[in-house]
Amino acid sequence: MTLFDSLRSPVDFLQSRLCVIQHFDLLATEQEWWKTEGGAISSAIDRAGTPWIRMFDRWGKRVDEILYPREYQTMLCKAYRSGVVWRALEENSLIPTYLLMYTISFYDPGICCPYTVSLGTAVPLTKYGSTESQARFLPQLLRKDDSVWQGATWMTEIGGGSDLGAAVNTIAKPAAEGWLLTGDKYFASNAGAELPVVAARPESAPAGVRGLALFLVPRYRGNEAGTLNYSIRRLKDKVATRSVPTGEIELRDSEAYFLGSADAGIYLILEVLNLSRVANSVVSVALAQRAMADALAYAERRTAFGKPVLEHPLLRRQVEVRLKLLRSTFALAWEAVRLLDQVWMERPPYSERYHLFRLVAHLAKYWTAEFAVDTAKWAMEVHGGLGTLAEYGVERWLREAMILAIWEGTPHRQILDGLEVMERKQAHKMLFAQLAEIAPNEALLEVQSEIERVLHLSPDKKEAEAEALFRRLAALSADQLAQRYTQ
Ligand SMILES: Cc1cc2nc3c(=O)[nH]c(=O)nc-3n(C[C@H](O)[C@H](O)[C@H](O)COP(=O)(O)OP(=O)(O)OC[C@H]3O[C@@H](n4cnc5c(N)ncnc54)[C@H](O)[C@@H]3O)c2cc1C
């Protein structure tokens, strides 16, 4: 095996990093299916573009049916059957979910969006749903066949996704049974899902994030068979994740079920977002691995100046350095998975470990997505002019990576929220204690004192200096954590 061989397969790479891989055979089977069947379906769908919507049936009834190629359903249902959602709750661990997501994203990073948002529905329902809601909905989300229900997580409105406290204008009114929601969601992935969770403001709740709450909104109304409970205004034509229908949603007195308690809504919303941020981190690393694998395969065969370009010292060094970065970026993402797996069933008020998790999740979401974009760009460059052509596929990784950096909170959001958890919960102190256990060193002390200096600046100066600090902390944490996985 050469130094680069583990790059060529997601399962080999996971095996090279983790001592124990749960469900190894399952992952190997999943990988084989994607290699022989799924990959071709995925690239055909990427080329064909966004699915269509049929808004009315032939008799004029509003149906908002999303028209996918038949193969898409096969591709989508594969991982639901394998347990990307049901295993988390049946095995009481998120590790199998994120291992599956890593394996699948090597072939299609976008398809993990439906899985992530379905998990983001099943988990809060399990933790915070009423007994009636759980009995009515949970079995459908955990089905092991193609009739499984999908979830979705709809927060963002036209006013923006970063400042949810100001931008969520969807109003929830109490009704005889449950609640009625009215408002518009502007970026709603997995449009058409059977059971989204939706952020809204109960009509008597205060302004700002503290007044937000989380609701389940079934696709169809309870007492009127086949009558839509929300409408899809249109589907968006996106640069990537093209197989995922992302739409604009209209809620008009839509029947809804409350999750959690009146004062805890924003915590529930953040818990859902954190599941997605960790998924995003895992997917970003897998995407970077895929882009590197493609670049490597090309550089081994393309010749220039009398030999394969991979044999030129400049390019070879680039691959070696990037492989080291891939390993450290993976270590950071996997630390977020490991910590989340310990705290995902916690409810507010959270433990110190939960706050440590939050900091690591912000670092991982930020750093892995930056690495994915940078690596996808580099992989295109290695292909030279051919890298820019849609027919060879490598340009897709850059399009997909750009979305990974933006959704689930842009880099700015990760940096500022990371700063907040350091300032308010002193989460960096727990992080440094853990990193020092791996291997104490001077750089740790330097960055820790830099954090203390920045945290004591005025608010404006603190924000202005936050990016350089966050980058340094992310890179350092990734390098330290990678030492755990050295083989
Ligand atoms: C393909 C796709 C699918 C999506 N699916 C969903 C979904 O299913 N559900 C959902 O709820 N949302 C979804 N989103 C929305 C996504 O979460 C938002 O795009 C994201 O949160 C950013 O919000 P925004 O686009 O409104 O940008 P804005 O919030 O308007 O921000 C614009 C810019 O200002 C920056 N900015 C904001 N505040 C600050 C600050 N304090 N300091 C510095 N810079 C700042 C932002 O980082 C960004 O660069 C999706 C987005 C995409 C692209």
Image: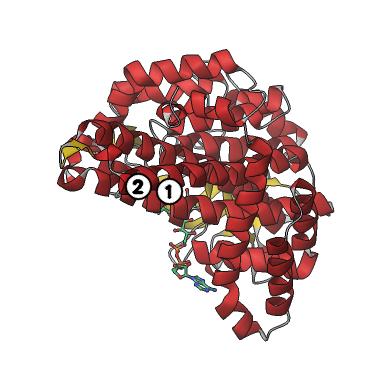
Give the quarter of the figure containing the N terminus.
top left
- Local packing at callout 1 (Cα closer than 10 Å; few below 14, some 14-19, many 20+) is many
Q: Amino acid at mark 2?
A: Ala
- Count of numbered badges drawn on the protein: 2
Camera sees residue 51: no
- Local packing at callout 2 (Cα closer than 10 Å; few below 14, some 14-19, many 20+) is many
Q: Quadrant of residue 98?
A: top right
- Please tell me which residue lies in front, 34 or 146: 34
Q: Position of residue 13 (x, y in %)?
A: 51, 29
Q: Position of residue 376 (x, y in %)?
A: 35, 47
Q: Quadrant of residue 440?
A: bottom right
Marks 1,2: beta carbons within 8 A = yes
According to the picture, the residue beneath numbered tag 1 turns out to be 372
Residue 300 left/right relative to 292: left
Residue at position x 73%, y 58% from top?
Answer: 441
Q: Amino acid at mark 1?
A: Ala
Q: Is residue 31 above or below residue 335?
A: above
Residue 104 left/right relative to 363: left
- Please tell me which residue lies in front, 433 or 153: 433
Residue 376 - label: 2
Q: Secondary structure at mark 1?
A: helix
